[in-house]
C-alpha cells in the first residue's frame, strides 16, 4: 500500500523472475542462464 512496501518487494520479485521462472523464449531456462559475467560472478 506504499512505495516503501513496493520497493521492498521488488528485490524478491526480480530474483524469482530472473533466477527461477522458466521463460519459453529461452527454451525453459531462466534469464540468468543467458548472462555472462553477472555482477559478483566474474571469472
Image (cartoon, grey):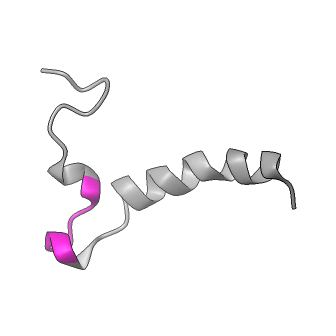
Residue occupying image coordinates x 19% and y 45%: 35
**Furthest-front residue in view?**
3
Would residue 23 appear left or right of 21 to someone viewing this image? Answer: left
Question: Which picture quadrant has residue 18?
Answer: bottom left
Q: Quadrant of the C terminus?
A: top left
Would residue 16 appear left or right of 30 to someone viewing this image? Answer: right
Q: Position of residue 10 (x, y in %)?
A: 61, 51
Is 20 drawn above or below residue 36 in the view shown? below
Q: In the rendered structure, does residue 26 fall within the stretch colored magenta?
A: yes
**Furthest-right residue in view?**
1
Count of numbered badges drawn on the protein: 0
Would residue 40 appear left or right of 2 to someone viewing this image? Answer: left
Q: Which residues are magenta?
A: 25-31
Residue occupying image coordinates x 27% and y 61%: 30
**Nearer to me, 3 or 34:** 3
Q: In the rendered structure, does residue 36 fall within the stretch colored magenta?
A: no
Q: Position of residue 24 (x, y in %)?
A: 22, 79
Q: Position of residue 39 (x, y in %)?
A: 31, 28
Question: Which picture quadrant has residue 28?
Answer: bottom left
Q: Quadrant of the N terminus?
A: bottom right
Residue occupying image coordinates x 25% and y 34%: 38
Question: Which picture quadrant has residue 40?
Answer: top left
**Nearer to me, 3 or 14:** 3
Residue occupying image coordinates x 19% and y 22%: 42
Amino acid at each position: 500500500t506504499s512505495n516503501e512496501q513496493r520497493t521492498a518487494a521488488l528485490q524478491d520479485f526480480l530474483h524469482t523472475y530472473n533466477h527461477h521462472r522458466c521463460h519459453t523464449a529461452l527454451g525453459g531456462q531462466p534469464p540468468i542462464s543467458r548472462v555472462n559475467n553477472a555482477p559478483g560472478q566474474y571469472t
